[in-house]
Image (tube, grey):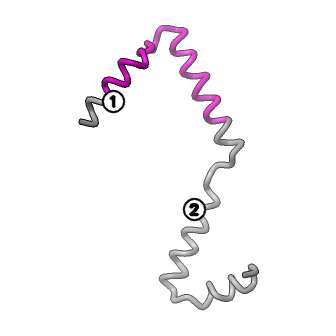
Amino acid sequence: MDSKTLQEAALNLPPDERAALAQKLLLSLDEPSEAELEQSWLAEAARRARELDSGEAQAIPAEEVRRKALSLLR
């Protein structure tokens, strides 16, 4: 279906359905791009590394995290 046909179909929807569709379309524009997501993860990794280096945060051994996670799931 081409965009013109899709637009015509959408405009023929009842007002409440058009509003819901418009909201979904607008929200889809607010999603971060792949590059923005990658930049956010890099910034988070750098922040965590600084906290570890400064002693503000302490590393927890993977086995301890695993044990805690398993105990929460039981």
Secondary-structure class at tag 1: helix
Q: Residue at x 52, y 8 (%)?
A: 54
Q: Report the predominant secondary structure element of the magenta stretch.
A: helix
Percent x, y of residue 59: 45, 14
Residue indicated by mark 2: 27
Q: Is residue 58 magenta?
A: yes
Label 1 crowding class (10 Å Cα cut-off): few <14, some 14-19, many 20+? few
- The region drawn magenta spans 39-68
Secondary-structure class at tag 2: helix
Which quarter of the figure has residue 47? top right
Percent x, y of residue 40: 62, 36
Amino acid at the residue labelled 2: Leu
Amino acid at the residue labelled 1: Ala
Which quarter of the figure has residue 43? top right
Residue indicated by mark 1: 69
Residue in front for this viewpoint, 57 or 65: 65
Q: Which residue is drawn at 58% across and 28% down?
A: 44
Taking 36 as reference, is 7 above or below it? below
In the image: residue 1, left or right of residue 28? right
Which of the two labelled residues, at mark 2 and mark 1, occupies the earlier sequence position?
2
Residue in front for this viewpoint, 49 or 65: 65
